[in-house]
């Protein structure tokens, strides 16, 4: 727990860590020292953290799974622009986590940290009789910085003590000031360093055997299979003048090793957001990020090749990417004219730093499908202005021009992109303005969105158009100096939506109350939430309700909903983390059956207001150091109201008032044998139970659907880029395949519609 040897004595010693939470400005509760040094290849950091070893939280975990443990971190603002920094964090056992921090928080990455960033660095950690020690070595090849003889970087050091909810920094990072990098220390003395000729090649080989149901032709499904199928490809990276990076990929394998976190997608009016997990799109993704989400890389479903340039020179940041997409042609049956066609994506982004922490920029996105003549082009400008130490203003204005027939773009959701459907020319602008405040006690977020009916983005994720929307969130937190409660206070969410005719669409009024306690304990209580939602005839028509699509129609439908609920999470126990949430009230049945005759007093062939319950629960166990067991349960229930139930009972005896029950049960087991070697098992059951068992429901067109998925994976991960994966996955559904009829749900029995065994090997060559 102390430096020994000549080299250690020459390293720069740092003390004086200061809490940000729970008690802003107080000294760290446990003595903490850090030592910094460098040679021609690496930057070194050693953290010496004094503590009771019985209270230290340190488990053997997969890379980046460190949230339940104590941590230390070094943040490096290598361009010293106070806007973007590398974050390297590790646990007392040396489990790694890395990310890119950006001062402008983004909802699509859940805050300021973009954890999609992965690079090569080294760690070692050990728990001792007096605490723990962590050693970090960061190769300069893993960083981008100016090509100058003398470097000037921003630096922040961090220690997190999990059981105390404690975040401590050097230098002091105050909660009274928005952001972190504007408060960073300046590190001088780095001389004669460079990433040098940094070239990376990551070839991979994939072998698999599989059997899966091909449903491209719904009337004639069949099983395709291969006893042994091979594939090779390459990712490459070239660094130009130390700070520009060219990434290239050829025949990439975009099958995901990581598994999607479960989400309820039934009865959703708009598209559901799933985060990106594919390596080619991850590094420097923030170079393309703007206030509006115009670069959603999952829109590029299956590229065969791509190239990307990112980097920064002085005050200018540049991002340029182009890729093809085979998915439109692969999704079409072989005999159709659209089989084998491709679309092409190009994204260009440039921004310039102004003032101390502000930027201005421009973006252009282009999607083309030459075979069908379709296109989608967007251009515009944006700016982020740091008004003072607490307030930030963001704005963006863009315009779109599109010609779309929905022949080439297989992934376009017509409900979320201008209510298309008949192929035509669409054009229109979109604007966003956002005001954000952070402080020790008071927080504020206000947003105004104006998206015209003709605005469409295929490369981006804008799930609603023809809307003028204002949202506001206000929070006030009291922070007691003593006791179990660390912070508490009220919050309020407000939302008002109008279309471009001035018609009110939605309003939302949601006060809630928050308590944060020791042991990573959080309690959220929403005593009453009021939500008004209006469906116009065209909204219901595109949800599939034919009664709205031609006159006469019922006109605008207004739904007045009320919801109450609470959620709770605690990491108080060293070997268990608990979380639960339950909300009850009203919900609109968007999956009502459009084909049933209208029945008074409630017409069930259009959306109608029902009773809704949603619940989630999770239990994470760590019975022994190498084993982590994550169990989760998601539930949604929709029921017709009592009056509708009584009416139905008088007309159709035996029919209950159930619309559907949706259950998702998931259990994930991970055994971490060593920092590199792990075995993982995921078992997941999805059960959508529509109506009364054995009878069905007059309230929905959905059939009962049951699915069971098993996923087994052995991973040997030396570092990002060098890995061996051996896996097997299988999927069972209550399906029956009938030629010339299609795929049908069955009340009993399961069909194995997909199974695969695979081995993937990749290796990082670094020059």
Image: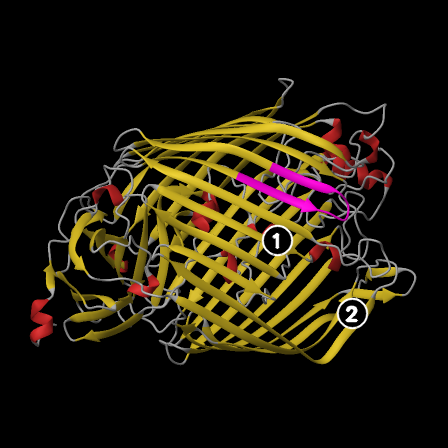
Q: Main secondary structure of the magenta part?
A: strand
Residue 384 seen from this side: yes
The residue that label 1 is drawn on is: 300
- Bounds of the magenta segment: 364-377
Question: Residue shown at 80%/51% (left/top)?
Answer: 696
Q: Position of residue 332 (x, y in %)?
A: 79, 56
Residue 508 seen from this side: no
Crowdedness near tag 2: few (<14), some (14–19) or many (≥20) residues, C-alpha within 10 Å: few
Q: Position of residue 474 (x, y in %)?
A: 38, 31
Question: Residue shown at 20%/70% (left/top)?
Answer: 132
Crowdedness near tag 1: few (<14), some (14–19) or many (≥20) residues, C-alpha within 10 Å: some
**Residue in the foreground of this view, choosing between 48 and 207:** 207
Between the residue at mark 1 and the residue at mark 2, the CA separation in whole angstroms equals 36 Å
The residue that label 2 is drawn on is: 749
Instruction: Please give left or right for residue 183 compared with residue 666 in the image.
Output: left
Q: Position of residue 36 (x, y in %)?
A: 16, 63
């Amino acid at each position: 727990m102390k430096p020994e040897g000549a080299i250690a004595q020459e390293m720069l010693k740092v003390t004086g860590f200061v809490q940000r939470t729970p008690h802003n400005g107080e000294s760290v509760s446990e003595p903490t020292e850090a030592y910094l040094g460098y040679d021609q290849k690496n930057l070194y950091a050693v953290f010496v953290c004094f503590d009771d070893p019985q209270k230290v939280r340190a488990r053997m975990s997969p890379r980046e799974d460190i949230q339940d443990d104590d941590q230390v971190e070094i943040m490096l603002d290598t361009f010293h622009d106070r806007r973007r920094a590398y974050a390297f964090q590790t646990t007392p056992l040396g489990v790694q986590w890395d990310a890119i921090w950006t001062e402008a928080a983004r909802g699509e990455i859940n805050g300021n940290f973009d954890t999609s960033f992965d690079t090569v660095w080294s760690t070692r950690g050990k728990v001792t009789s007096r605490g723990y020690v962590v050693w970090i070595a960061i190769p300069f090849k893993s960083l981008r910085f100016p090509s100058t003889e003398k470097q000037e970087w921003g630096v922040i050091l961090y220690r997190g003590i999990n059981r105390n909810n404690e975040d401590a920094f050097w230098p002091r990072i105050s909660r009274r000031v928005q952001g972190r990098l504007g408060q960073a220390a300046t590190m001088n003395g780095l001389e004669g360093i460079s990433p040098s000729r940094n070239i990376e090649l990551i070839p991979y080989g994939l072998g698999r055997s599989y059997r899966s149901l091909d449903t491209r032709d719904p009337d004639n499904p069949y099983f395709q299979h291969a006893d042994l199928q091979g594939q090779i490809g390459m990712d490459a990276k070239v660094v130009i003048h130390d700070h520009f990076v060219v990434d290239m990929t050829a025949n990439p394998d975009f099958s995901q090793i990581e598994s999607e976190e479960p989400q309820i997608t039934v009865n959703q009016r708009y598209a559901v957001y799933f985060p990106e997990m594919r390596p080619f799109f991850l590094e420097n993704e923030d170079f393309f990020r703007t206030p509006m989400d115009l670069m959603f890389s999952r829109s590029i479903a299956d590229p065969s090749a791509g190239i990307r340039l990112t980097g920064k020179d002085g005050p200018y940041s540049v991002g340029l990417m182009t890729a093809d997409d085979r998915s439109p042609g692969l999704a079409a049956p072989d005999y159709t004219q659209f089989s084998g066609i491709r679309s092409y994506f190009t994204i260009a982004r440039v921004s310039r730093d102004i003032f101390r922490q502000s930027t201005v920029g421009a973006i252009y996105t282009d999607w083309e499908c030459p075979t069908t003549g379709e296109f989608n082009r967007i251009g515009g400008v944006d700016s982020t202005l740091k008004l003072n130490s607490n307030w930030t203003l963001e704005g963006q204005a863009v315009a779109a021009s599109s010609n779309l027939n929905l022949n080439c773009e297989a992934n376009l959701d017509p409900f979320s992109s201008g209510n298309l459907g008949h192929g035509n020319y669409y054009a229109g602008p979109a604007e966003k303005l956002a005001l954000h405040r952070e402080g020790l006690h008071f927080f504020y977020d206000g947003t105004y969105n104006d998206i015209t009916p003709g605005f469409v983005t295929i490369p981006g994720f804008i799930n609603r158009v023809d809307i003028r929307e204002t949202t506001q969130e206000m929070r006030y937190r009291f922070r007691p100096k003593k006791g179990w409660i660390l912070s508490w206070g009220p919050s309020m969410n407000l939302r008002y939506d109008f279309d471009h005719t001035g018609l009110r669409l939605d309003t939302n009024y949601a006060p809630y109350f928050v308590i944060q306690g020791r042991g990573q304990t959080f309690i959220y209580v929403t005593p009453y939430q009021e939500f008004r939602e209006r469906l116009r005839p065209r909204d219901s028509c595109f949800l599939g309700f034919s009664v709205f699509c031609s006159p006469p129609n019922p006109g605008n439908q207004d739904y007045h909903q009320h919801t109450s609920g609470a959620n709770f999470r605690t990491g108080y126990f060293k070997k268990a983390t608990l979380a639960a949430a339950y909300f009850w009230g009203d919900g609109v049945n968007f999956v009502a059956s459009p084909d049933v005759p209208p029945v008074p007093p409630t017409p069930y062939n259009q959306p109608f207001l029902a009773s809704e319950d949603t619940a989630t629960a999770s239990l994470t166990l760590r019975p022994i150091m190498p084993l982590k067991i994550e169990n989760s349960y998601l539930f949604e229930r929709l029921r017709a109201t009592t009056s509708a139930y009584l009416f139905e009972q008088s007309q159709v005896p035996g029919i209950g008032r159930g619309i559907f029950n949706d259950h998702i049960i998931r259990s994930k087991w991970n055994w971490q044998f060593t920092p590199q070697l792990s075995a993982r098992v995921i078992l997941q059951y999805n059960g959508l139970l529509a109506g009364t068992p054995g009878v069905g429901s007059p309230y929905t067109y959905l059939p009962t659907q049951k699915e069971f998925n098993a996923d087994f994976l052995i991973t040997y991960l030396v570092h990002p880029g060098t890995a061996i994966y051996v896996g097997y996955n299988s999927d069972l559904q209550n399906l029956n395949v009938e030629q010339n009829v299609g795929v049908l749900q069955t009340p009993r029995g399961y069909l194995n519609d997909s199974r695969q065994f695979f081995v993937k090997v990749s290796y990082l060559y670094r020059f």
